[in-house]
Image (cartoon, grey):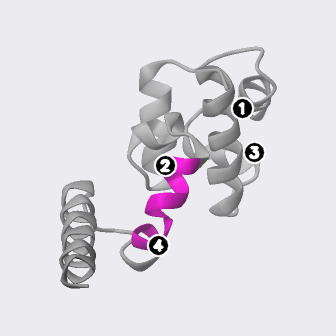
Amino acid sequence: MRLKQVFIQNLKELRKKEGFSQMKLAEHCNTSPSYIGEIEIGRKFPSVEMIEKFADVLRIEPYHFFRNRTEINNDSNIEKIYPLLPITMKNEIKNQIESSINEILNKY
């Protein structure tokens, strides 16, 4: 999947997951609902500054817009349990869990 399509798909999913309509997202980002619609159908692409606004409003790190579904699914449990932790802490938790699992598996 092309990067633009990954972004569009993730924006739609993350917006809906937060319960935001295009209008509500637009209001929070000081833009128009038609601009959000144009992005979501692929006619326009947002600036880096707008991507940062989207991320702030949707309470995610901006890079999440560019991750494929496999990467997102691998981290989804940590996101559900610890949604407001900084990404560095989430990564540390993930690494510790993987290390513990590997340690247990190596015993058997």
Q: Which secondary structure class fits the magenta region best?
A: helix
| Horizontal side, residue 42 vs residue 55: left or right | right
Image position of 98 with respect to 22: above or below: below
**Cα distance in 3D space between marks 1 and 4:** 29 Å
The amino acid at mark 4 is: Asn
Of marks 1 and 4, which one's residue comes earlier in the chain? 1
Image marks 1 and 3: residues in contact by CB distance under 8 Å: yes
Residue matched to label 1: 36
x 41%, y 79%: residue: 81
- The circle drawn on residue 23 is 3
Is the residue marked by circle 3 packed among few (<14), some (14-19), or many (20+) residues within 10 Å? some
Front of the two marks 2 and 3: 2
Of marks 1 and 3, which one's residue comes earlier in the chain? 3
x 18%, y 77%: residue: 103
Circle 4 SS class: helix
The amino acid at mark 3 is: Met
Image marks 2 and 3: residues in contact by CB distance under 8 Å: no
Is the residue marked by circle 4 packed among few (<14), some (14-19), or many (20+) residues within 10 Å? few
Image position of 76 with respect to 15: above or below: below
Image position of 84 with respect to 54: above or below: below
Of marks 2 and 4, which one's residue comes earlier in the chain? 2
**Cα distance in 3D space between marks 3 and 4:** 29 Å
Front of the two marks 3 and 4: 4
Depth order, front residue of 65/32? 65
Which quadrant is home to the N terminus? top right
Residue matched to label 2: 71
The amino acid at mark 2 is: Glu
Q: How far from the left and from the top, in percent, is residue 17?
A: 66, 62
Residue matched to label 4: 77
Asked where in the image residue 84 lies, by quadrant, the reply is bottom left
